[in-house]
Amino acid sequence: MKKIYELENNYISVQEQSYGGSQTYFRGVKGAFNKGRNLGGCGIVAIGDTISYLKNDTEFSSIDEYRSYFKSISKNALWIPTRLGLNFIHITLAAKSIFRKNKLSYKIKWCFSRKKLYTRIKGMLINNIPVILCIPKILKPSKNKEELSFYDCSVNKVSKTHGHFVTVTGIYEDNNKLYLQISSWGKKFYISFEEYVQFSKHHIFGLLGNILYIEPSSTR
């Protein structure tokens, strides 16, 4: 893959092993809310990682340290952990509130335009800002469920999902096709930009297949 744009600095790591935080650090952990954190915590991870990156505080020395950070973001987001996670309204309001508490001066809004999607992602990366992106949820019987493919750096399909927030950290090209480099579940993946747009177009919640747009408040 050929790099087109990418964040300037090292991304979030936990114990120098992960690529981003992960809600899976709560999998199998005893506690009343840990199942909900594991199943629905992707939006909290996305907000937390974005704030950590913008504050240049990207290294967590232990999983326990990251879990504590995740819980603090959840508390500030007023999120009661359930498998349903955050929706686009909640993640937008939560991000605005938590950015203010961390004295990060940015304008934040949820986007709906597909025509401006690539330009906005590119602009945020050029400004060294991670991009929180929503993979819309699909309401179909399990046996017919469509999901968006995740690829590795050799463009091998390695996973798939729907109803999920990820963080875009770069734009790459392979065989004249654009791919978004993402952080999900503490790992680095790639999604086809074209596949993402088509996936969003063809489903009832596809309009929510977009990004949380963040720009410095001084930008006019």
Image: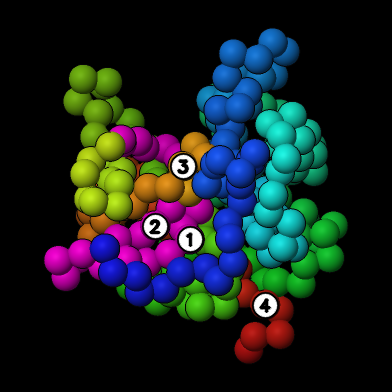
59 in the magenta segment: no
Q: Amino acid at mark 2?
A: Gln
Task: Please rate how many residues cluster around mark 2, counting C-alpha atoms within 10 Å: few if below 14, some from 14 to 19, many from 20.
Answer: many
Q: Position of residue 65 (x, y in %)?
A: 76, 35
Q: Which mark is residue 169?
A: 1
Residue highlighted by disc 3? 187
Location of residue 142 with respect to 51 vertically, above or below? above
Q: Secondary structure at mark 4?
A: strand
Front: mark 3 or 4: 3
| Contact flag, marks 3 and 4 (Cβ < 8 Å) | no
Q: Residue at x 52, y 47 (%)?
A: 19
Q: Position of residue 72 (x, y in %)?
A: 79, 39
Residue highlighted by disc 2? 181
Looking at the image, tell me whether mark 3 or mark 1 is earlier in sequence order: 1
Residue range corresponding to the magenta coloring: 159-182
Q: Amino acid at mark 1?
A: Thr
Question: Could you tell me how far apart the alpha carbons at marks 1 and 2 are, in whole angstroms?
Answer: 6 Å
Q: Secondary structure at mark 2?
A: strand
Question: Could you tell me how far apart the alpha carbons at marks 3 and 2 are, in whole angstroms?
Answer: 10 Å
